[in-house]
Image (tube, rainbow, N blue to C red):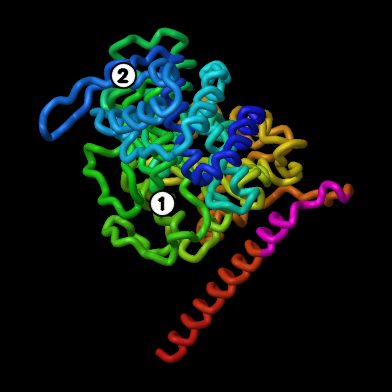
Amino acid sequence: MTDVVGKLWGFCHTLRHDGIDHGDYIEQITYLLFLKMAAERGLDLSRVEQRSPRGPLEAMDCSWPALRAVSGQALLDRYAEVLRSLDRAPGVLGEIYAGSQPRFKSPANLRRLVDLIDEIEWTRLGVDIKAAAYEGLLEKAAAEGKKGAGQYFTPRVLIQSIVRCMRPDPRGTPGFALCDPACGTGGFLVAAWEWLEAEARGTLDRETADRVKSTAFFGHELVARPRRLALMNLYLHGIEPRIALGDSIDAPPPPPEERFDVILTNPPFGTKGAHQTPHREDFAIATANKQLNFIQHVLTILRPGGRAAMVLPDNCLFADQAGAVFKILAEGCDLHTVLRLPRGTFTPYSPGVKANVVFFTKGRATEKVWIYDARTGVPSITKKDRPLSPAHFAEFERCYGDDPDGRATREAASSSEGRFRSFELREVEEREFKLDGFKWLREEPLDDAGEQPEPEELATDAIQELEEAVAALNRVLALLEGGAKAAEA
């Protein structure tokens, strides 16, 4: 995959002379990759019907072989016609290519990219290749300080581990619906389908498969390009998803009959778009904190008995109003498990971010919270020397058990290093529902200078300590104010 990204990126520099910037180049690649992979998967695009307010248009041959067969100005013209036709196609195809525009001016440059894509059999690479190429190119752009430096994606190793724990199985559940309200390139949705295929072991009957593919997958994405990739990825798996474009927090809550059985999501971290309190009557706590609002949003769109897994940064566990939100969560849901992720999980996009996965089931109150610490004493993840692997989560999955609602028999001793421990609700209440305060493993000092944390991680630690201090001071001030008011009375 690294070699492929290197080739694609190297050609990106050539295209600068054609007036194509990084973002446009990445988008043009996704258009062409989809056509090539559709041909590899046997999807017939040789007669794409088009919608028109003035009546039906002639079907257009939008297939990869037809595009590859022409050269020169005819190739530029053909490519433009293909994009126009796909833009007017009904259904998911039209959504994928909505607003698509050709950016190439030189026939030679387009020919070279077509040849580059054509020489690789993409579906044999065994990964979600378009998303991987997209993320790899964004990483390159980030390294050069270009637009996109703040974007990062949930590692597939983590996604697959969460899916194995959550077991999003629609068999035997008519109307089953799975949603990611911050779906990015569709990683959770694709992994859920792949898990189901593997779990069924070829026994998934056609009726169930058709039902699931056409009615079970939902998403919401703020940015148009990742949404386009999500639609492409799922379409290539034969899935017809419904993925809305926009901020899911600002969308009106769905009626009860349109809510979801399983929610898997990694809401965007950071402060962009923060300091804005959404106008949602269903949110009990008015806050400008994006992650806390996402928790409240998930609580609304989850069906009674439904379950969710959310990736949340550490500061979401102790920020102002975090206790109030988690108190509501614990009262309305069984907040049964928290996975404290290793440092560097989001390398290379945000290596300093510390995060957790919070698992809960709606409809019964929390009695105890199990926390698995996969961070303390674990060397930080790096891209080359210590990449994230399934081994980082193997013991957690075993401790989690085979019940997706977290009700499997659990014991602290099930973790060989004492990383799995439960806390009664009263202990959570004593800490004002601030889940970051539960730390029982000792952090061993790093003897090797080469093992010292990266500067970004040190800065993140310092910021977190300051935020925790400010939160503690605010609590003290609130107590003092309360005492002063009582004295005045």
The numbered dot on residue 481 is: none
Q: Nearer the viewer, residue 114 or 331?
A: 114
Q: Which residue is mark 1?
A: 294
Question: In the rendered image of this protein, does residue 238 appear above or below residue 227?
Answer: above
Residue farthest toward the bottom in the current orientation of the protein: 488
Q: Nearer the viewer, mark 2 or mark 1?
A: 2
Q: Which residues are magenta?
A: 449-462
Residue 461 is inside the magenta segment: yes
Image quadrant occupied by the C terminus: bottom left
- Measure how far apart labels 2 and 1 are at the Cα level: 43 Å
The residue at 66%/30% (across/down) is 2
The residue at 55%/38% (across/down) is 135
Circle 1: is it few (<14), some (14-19), or many (20+) Cα within 10 Å?
many
The spot of residue 275 in percent (x, y) is 43, 66
Residue at disc 1, secondary structure: helix
Residue 314 is inside the magenta segment: no
Q: Nearer the viewer, residue 283 or 265?
A: 265
Q: Main secondary structure of the magenta part?
A: helix
Question: In the rendered image of this protein, does residue 459 appear above or below residue 356?
Answer: below
The residue at 56%/58% (across/down) is 315
Q: Which residue is mark 2?
A: 61
Question: In the rendered image of this protein, does residue 399 appear above or below residue 283?
Answer: above
Q: Is residue 17 left or right of residue 167?
A: right
Q: Is residue 208 left or right of residue 31?
A: left
Inspect the image, locate mark 2, and give the three-letter code of the amino acid beneath it: Asp
Inspect the image, locate mark 1, and give the three-letter code of the amino acid beneath it: Phe
The residue at 74%/36% (across/down) is 384
The spot of residue 75 in percent (x, y) is 41, 26
Q: Which label's residue is closer to the chain start, 2 or 1? A: 2
The number of discs equals: 2
Circle 2: is it few (<14), some (14-19), or many (20+) Cα within 10 Å?
many
